[in-house]
Amino acid sequence: MTSVGPRRNDDTLVLGMNPHTQAEAEAIQKSNPRARVTTLQDAAQNDQVRTRDPDGAMRIHGLRTEVGIRAFVATLGLPFAQSQQVAAAISSAGEDARDELAQLAQVWARAEKGGVVPSRLVLSGHSGGSSLWGEEAGFTNGVLTRHSIARLAAAMPRAAAQVEDLCIAACYNGGETTMEKWRALFPNLQTMWAYDGSAPGTFSGATAHLARWEKATRGEVDSLRSDLLRGLRKGDNLAVWSRRDGYQSATVSASTADLRARHAAARATFERYFRGDEQVRDTQRGPLREHYNTIQALLGRPEVPASEHVGLERARDQTLRLLFYGNVATHFQETHRSGIRRGFAALGLNVPDFSRLGRGEALVVIQSFKAELARRNPPPVEAQRLLPLLTEGLRDLQRSYIPDNWL
């Protein structure tokens, strides 16, 4: 364990990917007015970060290029080798997530130079268990992965060693093995708070939850109880870990054998939705959501071997995209509109609007496109370029084509 000396404090760093991060930070501040709460959130302009020169002049650094990232990192005052690691961590983040990660590096740089940073860290946003993103009506933010945060923590070990209390205010990060992956980032962690299931939104319970978390982690704390949210909406999804008492969840879960049986039995249900034979009426309830919950529960079980995780993670990502297929189709059409037009026109086919087609209708159109393309020799370049977007993207719902923040 890395020693941090007498640096424990009740200050809190809140990094949020959704538009209401400030309200969550204010709930923590109201709970403990004496503690300092620092808020990190989406920049006014995507992937830009502000710094101040020694003379107080404000500078804006663009983070979309390696040159811009290196120029920003140079303002942190770190050794050359460490600066290279920090730059690589920021570069690893996706579009419109580099600004949040760079802001985190700004705060953590104090610890790397012998200073003190907040002992408590809140990470907030939408999540499927391995990343955080922001999405709401009229607002879309980037996707910040645990991998990128881990790279920054490894590049700034003194800062990571000062984090003692971690709260993941996001869905599906409360499985035991998922919490282990987060805990590995912070060697002196004393407590962790997450949700083994869905978490409440900012104004549907998160602020009340965060106020209780603040009170429970105030001062020297090495244990948490899983019933701390009793009586609150989605409080039964709470999962906690503490150095003293280990992992606990608020509800008694099904056995791993039962989860495996449910997963196998629900395969036919998944296929009906995947083919478009059945439509999702409620993204939060119903047989497909229950299947998604089962997959997430299996991923959180330590007795499920790592060799099974790749398949389960693929099923998790595909099922989540199927649950929110309406959002996926809308974003797909908006993002690839010109490519869709050129690809279908190259084959002399009517140009579809996938945002207006149901899942089953879209699959028929994609199959017709694929069959017509196979008949062409030579195949039109624009149609060839579109094919993987249609098949691996909209049809197969692969994460590499359908990003988290479309959901």
Image (cartoon, rainbow, N blue to C red):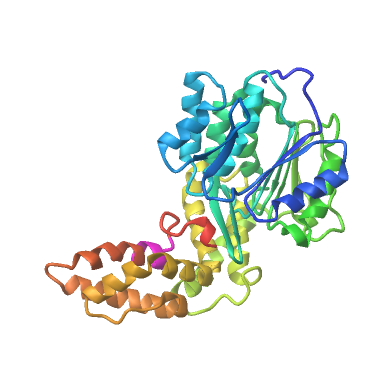
Residue at 60% from the left image edge and 77% from the top image edge: 281
Residue 240 percent coordinates (x, y): 75, 43
Residue 189 painted magenta:
no
Residue 361 percent coordinates (x, y): 41, 80
Residue 247 visible to the viewer: no
201 versus 129 height, above or below: below
Comparing 265 with 198, the one in front is 198
Residue 283 percent coordinates (x, y): 61, 70
Question: Which span is picked out in magenta?
Answer: 391-397
**292 displayed left or right of 218:** left
Residue 211 visible to the viewer: yes
Quadrant of res 158:
top right
Residue at 55% from the left image edge and 32% from the top image edge: 152
> How many numbered marks are there?
0
Q: Main secondary structure of the magenta part?
A: helix
Residue 396 painted magenta:
yes
188 versus 20 height, above or below: above
Q: In which quarter of the image is the C terminus?
A: bottom right
Q: Which residue lies furthest to the left in this view?
A: 377
Q: In which quarter of the image is the N terminus?
A: top right
Comparing 246 with 393, the one in front is 393
Quadrant of res 395:
bottom left
Residue at 50% from the left image edge and 25% from the top image edge: 83
Residue at 20% from the left image edge and 64% from the top image edge: 381
Residue 32 percent coordinates (x, y): 87, 41
